Amino acid sequence: MKRVYLDWNATTPPLDAVVDAMRDAARQSWGNPSSTHAFGREARGCVEDARCAVARLAGCNPRDVILTSGATEANNLALRSAFATAGATGGCLVTTRMEHPSVTRVAEALEREGRARVRWVQVDGHGTIDLADLERALGEERVHLAAVQAVNHETGTVQPLAQVIDLARRSHVVLHVDAVQAFGRIEDVAEGAATRSLAGHKMRGPKGIGALVRQPGVAVAPVLVGGSQEGGLRPGTVDPVAAAGLAVAARHALSSPSRWRQLGPLRDALETGVFRVAPGARINGAAASRAPHLASIAFPGWSGPELVAALDLEGVAASSGSACSAGTAEPSAPLVAMGDLEAARSTVRFSLGEDTTSADIDFALAALERILRRAV
């Protein structure tokens, strides 16, 4: 049966070159990167190659790249380390309900633990951060960190990063940007932020590896304790095989935004086709600045997860929200934050990628039409 993959925000298919690099590394560079003998040095070469490739992508020095198990760990490291010292305990964390669970749930945990007070900044009905409310929040007492994502994982809303970075700088507040959905997809990857997170598998690399990128002089405190890997900031043996794949993916991502930008017409064709087969459908965040590859569409009267399951039976892979929240009964937190409870329960997210074709879009629309007709 033909299958079409329209869930690129959940993960991306690895490049052939990534798979080849990992296969070679598994055969030749399997040593412990911390060992000083030849086997260790071979493995260390893969790790440092990845660090340099990520640094070039992020526009920073390799020494400011901390390799992690992925963006979830990178986000945890950025948030928790900001409140790791006694002087920071009880300070304020400024963020929004649009963020990925690896930010919002850490913020909630810090507040439960008494380590931080969370100030939730308002967003408008299209998912764009309220800059006036952000400015007010940054001016409150003892703000130690602000966390704002670059591109929303569910709606594709692109936040006004230049203004956010400027407000944080003028308020002398450290800013963390979850740039997972930005690296390799849009040009603005928040180079002015104090820290940024990325994940290899979101840019056609392997799962299980990512990075926290920091500005020179930005203090990061370890969340885990153990060995001295990654300067003691992230103890644990770095996988040279995953690092080899990340290096290839990061170099590919340097030229990716132009390819992802060309997905705009395909995304528009998908949305137009949805309106034809489902006249009552509506686009979430339609009036916001959106990444060109993502269509977040509400189908009033339908259950988003049920539509996703029906599409899967027809050979179309989509999602009803963040893959990290799949299987929960809770409605989409970003869409709830935008004030649309109906959309939070009835949305299907179609995310396109470099390999998506117009034939894929036609196939998905035909599948959707069959599903909707069966319910009439």
Image: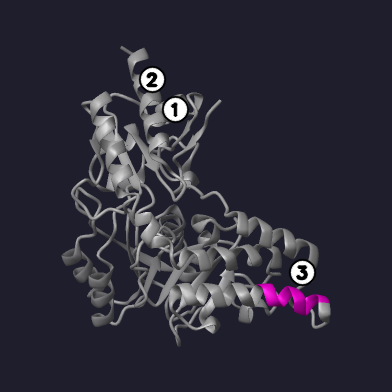
Locate the C terminus and report the quarter of the image it occupies.
Answer: top left
Q: Are marks 1 and 2 in contact (CB under 8 Å)?
A: yes
Q: Within 10 Å of the Cα at label 2, are there few (<14), some (14-19), or many (20+) other Cα atoms? A: some
Residue 289's place in the image compared with 236, above or below, is above
Q: Which residue sits at x=24%, y=35%?
A: 272
Residues under labels 1 and 2: Cα distance?
A: 8 Å
Q: Let me know if residue 246 appears in the view.
A: yes
Q: What kind of colouring is applied to the model shown? A: one colour
Residue 264 appears left or right of 234: left
Q: At numbered mark 1, what does the secondary structure look like: helix, strand or loop? A: helix
Per the image, the residue denoted by label 2 is: 371
Give the extent of the magenta segment: 39-46
Q: Amino acid at mark 3?
A: Ser
In front of the other: 254 or 137: 254
In front of the other: 148 or 307: 307
Q: Which residue sits at x=38%, y=38%?
A: 358
Closer to the chain start, of discs 1 and 3, is 3
Q: Amino acid at mark 2?
A: Ile
